[in-house]
């Protein structure tokens, strides 16, 4: 029974990995800059965010700033913290 349960969990994990690999091409990938890291540090400190959460929010805010004057606007769910 334990072996069957382990096998099922491994299959679920493999399915999740496959799903991530398929989704990867649709992700917006941005370079982690000093500007982003500095903002992430401030967000982590001021908003009590964990490291990865602060980096994700900082990345979204930096990206939002870059498109602030563009015709094509990006929609962000997160409230602007800066």
Image: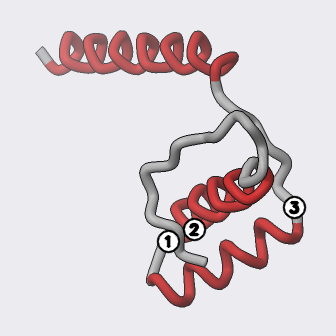
| Secondary structure of the residue carrying numbered label 1 | loop
The image shows residue 69, relative to residue 36, as above or below, that is above
- Alpha-carbon neighbours of circle 3 within 10 Å: few (<14), some, or many (≥20)? few
Q: In the shown orientation, is residue 29 left or right of residue 42?
A: right
Residue 14 spot, x, y in % from top left: 45, 13
**Residue at figure coordinates x 20%, y 10% from the top left:** 4
The residue wearing badge 3 is: 33
Residue 38, located in which quarter of the rendered image?
A: bottom right
- Mark 2 or mark 3: which comes first in sequence? 3
Quadrant the N terminus occupies: top left
Q: In the shown orientation, is residue 1 left or right of residue 73?
A: left
In the depicted view, which residue is nearer to us: 9 or 50? 50
Q: CA distance from mark 1 to mark 3?
A: 18 Å
Q: Do the residues bearing badges 2 and 1 touch, measured as CB atoms within 8 Å?
A: yes
The residue wearing badge 2 is: 54
**Residue at figure coordinates x 63%, y 54% from the top left:** 60
């Amino acid at each position: 029974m334990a072996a069957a349960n382990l096998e099922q969990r491994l299959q679920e994990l493999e399915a999740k990995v496959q799903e991530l690999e398929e989704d990867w091409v649709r992700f917006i990938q941005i370079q982690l800059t000093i500007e982003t890291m500095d903002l992430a540090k401030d967000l982590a400190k001021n908003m009590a965010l964990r490291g990865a959460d602060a980096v994700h929010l900082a990345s979204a805010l930096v990206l939002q700033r870059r498109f602030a004057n563009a015709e094509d606007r990006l929609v962000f769910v997160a409230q602007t913290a800066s």
